Amino acid sequence: MEVTKTLAKFVVESGYADIPEKVRREATRSVLNWLGCAVGGCRHETIDCALAALMPFAGPAQATVLGRGERLDIMHAALVNGTSSHVFDFDDTHLKTVIHPGGPVASALLALAEHRPMSGTDFMHAFILGVEVECRIGNAVYPSHYDVGWHITGTAGVFGAAAAAGRMLGLSAQQMTWALGIAATQAAGLREMFGTMCKPFHVGRAAQNGMTAAFLASKNFTSSERGIEAPRGFANVLATARNYDAITEELGKTWEVALNTYKPFACGIVIHPAIDGCIRLRNEHKLKAEQIESVALKVHPLVLELTGKRTPQAGLEGKFSVYHSAAVAIIHGEGGERVYSDAAVRDPKVIALRDKVTAAVDKSVHEDAVHVAIKLKDGRTLEKHVEHAIGSLARPMSDADLEAKFRGLADGILSRAGTDALIKLCRSVEKLKDAGEIARAAVPAAGSAKRAKAS
Amino acid sequence: MEVTKTLAKFVVESGYADIPEKVRREATRSVLNWLGCAVGGCRHETIDCALAALMPFAGPAQATVLGRGERLDIMHAALVNGTSSHVFDFDDTHLKTVIHPGGPVASALLALAEHRPMSGTDFMHAFILGVEVECRIGNAVYPSHYDVGWHITGTAGVFGAAAAAGRMLGLSAQQMTWALGIAATQAAGLREMFGTMCKPFHVGRAAQNGMTAAFLASKNFTSSERGIEAPRGFANVLATARNYDAITEELGKTWEVALNTYKPFACGIVIHPAIDGCIRLRNEHKLKAEQIESVALKVHPLVLELTGKRTPQAGLEGKFSVYHSAAVAIIHGEGGERVYSDAAVRDPKVIALRDKVTAAVDKSVHEDAVHVAIKLKDGRTLEKHVEHAIGSLARPMSDADLEAKFRGLADGILSRAGTDALIKLCRSVEKLKDAGEIARAAVPAAGSAKRAKAS
């Protein structure tokens, strides 16, 4: 059975007209979400460290560091932007595999678009194909591959970046087969690194290494032609079980990007129903913290197992506290990155409300559900049952939700006008003559970043 | 048990005076052998492809492409030189693990030496420590890690490069722990790629990625502090059995570089006894091909299993032919890269003698032994029993052998005078004020390469 060759041939021969409108639309939403995350994460310490370490070795100024404006060679730009896009753990999720599909693929592709101009249509086509490749390979080895200890966004992502970049370089089927093989032999990233700067680094490295694979293959740098399925290939060496049909069947008929989801809140996904419920009650009743006597949550068991921190001391710990999350949802009406800052966690008003939140495990509550009961000082009790949290496949974020998330992430980095323009560019990406415009628009106008921050 | 931290602490605290003279001497021989291989491989198609693909993204001219003279940023130089050093499969071997220790470590370190000047003593110290780290990690996971399908020079090599470069950057123990973790999460390279350009690429990538890990750690880029031993760390995820004592015991008391070996011949190690025996009979009796009626070899079973090609058509196939190897050993008195060219394999004189060679399996013959019987047209039969082939641990190559190998590799690339000077620099590396001199001397003088080739 020829798995790698079959996949390579599909990527090389795919026609954009064969991709349904609904799939393209979801892909555009994926790119917007990825871009917001990359811009939002660009000032994180992880990015500062990476740039300080690697800038002395960077090549010509070919591509933009999103949100910042430094220009690096495309390989370094892909590394930095990919890292930035995952640093908040706020990017997209292919729920079947827990792959974050956008980072590896879009980070490679947008950097490449600045170096080798491509139309918005070609950009989106390559993006969809890259996501298809990484998620299909993920489907074939999940869950055993993840259970062994591999960070699947790193290991599957490198294939996606190779496929997308290879498509844009016009690789032949033979070269694409090599590109996937060169990707296979660079697949890396351990789950042990979760909680450290290496986790987002995996995403950047997948983008960079996958693009490297494509460029090498374009010069006829050879690899095995069975990089995925050979006895000593990727699927056998890095997983204990595998299903190649998930890679080769219904190619061109089903599209994995259509299954992509986006986090509305910048924290562990198990807390999302609680935040959703609190925000809805807040907005429906124009609640103020001062009115509240207590907040009682009935939650799925995983919520307390993973996010039961009663008294978080730092922003990062706040992401593992359902109590903090419920409090900021009521006070600020959101669950974005800024409500997980150190300052937000230490805000006396937040702490006061947090201490009034209780959470009880209820085994009848599903993973994307919650029951919220807010008792007010005036004696009333407001209740909300959330069946499917916002951002789940059953209740996807609307375009407006995605825009609001994007604005929250870009706030303080881009000006309002710059953010407006960038959202507009992303929405109409298929009409762009030069997709690289998006990257060049994703930087602060001179002096505007500080103004935006101060506003 | 703190494996990663213990190893990091050792690397950071090691003193050069604690390393025995014999160990340092073997390390110098390892560097000489590595350099010869890197220079010799520099015109290989693999290097041409890699440079064509990646030069457009290279950074400042910080370090030399050995044997060629292009100057790249140190990361790309490490990649290219590491790849070049393994392209002939002629580099060193740590027999306990089949790691080729020199490539990942020296390729990183010499590039770094051109960017951040270091003394020859510091260079050799870091080299020895890098080899120690990669081979100890190899010892801990071999053979299960290799059996699973990992190319151990790639996967263990990245740790060696990180340790060596990290030592030169003066990392703290904390930073060195991170560097080893960042290395762990980049460990990659599949045995499936053997026989393709990706095999040597693994070595170059290990050098580059390991050095990247060191630079990132130097800016406090964090990773797990248990990258090697954690339940989801390197040794658990990439191997089915492991022995951490092999990493942490007798640190500073035993030295893996002392166990390094060097291939005298540019082909599969199982043919080495036959070549050795044929060369010795040739030289002892001043044999000419025309005198010979037949050549009968008694060999270990693996010889015919791995290298039984009767009629090789191309140079690379010649490396898997004990018949071709015996013929060129008698005709040319050597087993260097040039007797495995396409032309050498097609030479009618070689073919005529090759057809007179027979090989019979004899289970009593040890893996590094052979029995050779050459029947002459004048009726005499000359016999030679080789108990341990040259290059084995029991019969190491002499310094003169290593020099001759180096000269064979550099021939046609460097001038004779340039080769002499380079060997001298390597021999006295510990006295150099600036180890980077070695790299700058490992390039053809303008115009001399062609003259050398023509001569």
Image (cartoon, coloured by chain):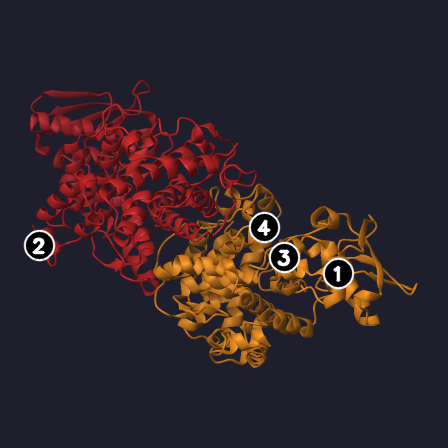
Chain colours: A red, B orange
Please tell me if label 4 and label 1 are on a single chain: yes
Q: Position of residue B195 (x, y in %)?
A: 57, 50
Give a yes or no on whether discs 1 and 2 share a subunit: no
Q: Chain of mark 3?
A: B
Residue A455, percent across and down? 7, 50
Which secondary structure, mark 1?
Answer: helix
Q: CA distance from mark 1 to mark 3?
A: 14 Å
Q: Amino acid at mark 3?
A: Gly
Q: Quadrant of residue B54?
A: bottom left
Q: Name the residue type under label 4.
A: Ala
The numbered dot on residue A151 is none
What amino acid is found at the position of numbered circle 1 in the picture? Ala
Q: Which residue carries the number 4 mark?
A: B140
Q: Is residue B167 visible?
A: yes
Say which element carries label 2: helix
Q: Using the image as rendered, state which of residue A293 and residue B236 is in the foreground.
A: B236
